[in-house]
Image (cartoon, rainbow, N blue to C red):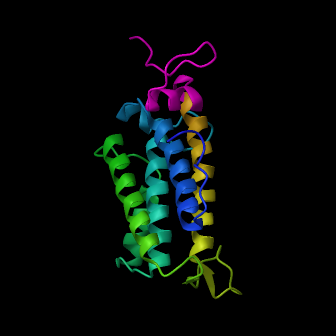
């Protein structure tokens, strides 16, 4: 996908296109990394590329489940364990595996959003979550999609910083490499460093 979402007149398609564009930012930041590099936390924080991919995958799945009013079950203890594990790429996990899971969730988002009645459909606000408002009964599907775009964009920025700290690679050269752009005098696609 090019660096900008395409112009569209259908609001649902446009919101999904912006979400897809931000997903690509995360995927591009992971491009060419080994599993070991995807586990690195080279900045002052504890973020890794693999952890960021897992986090945005779980976050998107959670919000789309809310919009579709799906309950995946599980105990509170299991949900807490899953939440804590979503911030790092475990030794038994691969970057390719978490990227595949992200693609699966993205495809589910597309199907689910198209199946919903409309962007104004209410999405009940879960109760007892300290960062959710107590004085709002429901968001709309539109609000959920805008929130997801904001969430993924925030973490795509984190991924850019983490990636640059790993090997100096930045967004445009990575995007050029992913999309197969030809080299120009002002932009060279990223290539792995020689061993």
- Horizontal and vertical percent position of residue 49: 48, 41
Extent of the magenta region = 166-195
Q: Can residue 13 be seen in this view?
A: yes
- Image quadrant for the C terminus? top left
Indicate left or right for 93 with 85 as reference.
Answer: left
Q: Residue at x 48, y 63 (%)?
A: 60
Q: Can residue 81 be seen in this view?
A: no
Q: Which residue is drawn at 53% across and 62% down?
A: 13
Indicate left or right for 188 with 104 as reference.
Answer: right
Q: Residue at x 49, y 62 (%)?
A: 59
Q: Residue at x 49, y 77 (%)?
A: 66
- Horizontal and vertical percent position of residue 158: 60, 43
On screen, residue 161 above or below 60:
above
Q: Nearer the viewer, residue 108 or 126?
A: 108
- Horizontal and vertical percent position of residue 85: 41, 56
Classify residue 160 by image quadrant: top right
On screen, residue 139 above or below 113:
below
- Horizontal and vertical percent position of residue 25: 54, 42
Q: Which residue lies furthest to the left in this view?
A: 92
Query: Is residue 47 highlighted in magenta?
Result: no
**Main secondary structure of the magenta stretch:** loop
Q: Which residue lies furthest to the right in this view?
A: 135
Query: Is residue 180 highlighted in magenta?
Result: yes
């Amino acid at each position: 996908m090019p660096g900008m979402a395409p112009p569209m007149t259908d609001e649902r398609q446009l919101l999904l296109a912006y979400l897809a564009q931000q997903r690509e930012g995360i995927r591009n930041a992971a491009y060419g990394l080994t599993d070991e590099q995807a586990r690195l936390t080279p900045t002052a924080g504890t973020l890794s590329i693999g952890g960021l991919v897992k986090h945005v995958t779980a976050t998107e799945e959670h919000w789309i489940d809310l919009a579709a009013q799906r309950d995946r079950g599980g105990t509170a203890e299991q949900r807490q364990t899953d939440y804590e594990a979503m911030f790092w790429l475990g030794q038994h996990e691969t970057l390719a595996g978490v990227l595949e899971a992200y693609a699966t969730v993205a495809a589910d988002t597309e199907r689910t959003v198209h199946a919903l009645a409309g962007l104004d459909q209410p999405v009940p606000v879960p109760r007892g979550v300290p960062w959710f408002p107590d004085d709002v009964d429901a968001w709309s599907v539109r609000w959920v999609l805008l929130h997801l775009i904001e969430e993924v964009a925030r973490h795509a920025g984190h991924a850019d910083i983490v990636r640059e700290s790993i090997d100096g690679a930045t967004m445009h050269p990575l995007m050029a490499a992913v999309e197969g752009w030809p080299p120009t005098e002002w932009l060279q696609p990223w290539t792995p460093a020689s061993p």
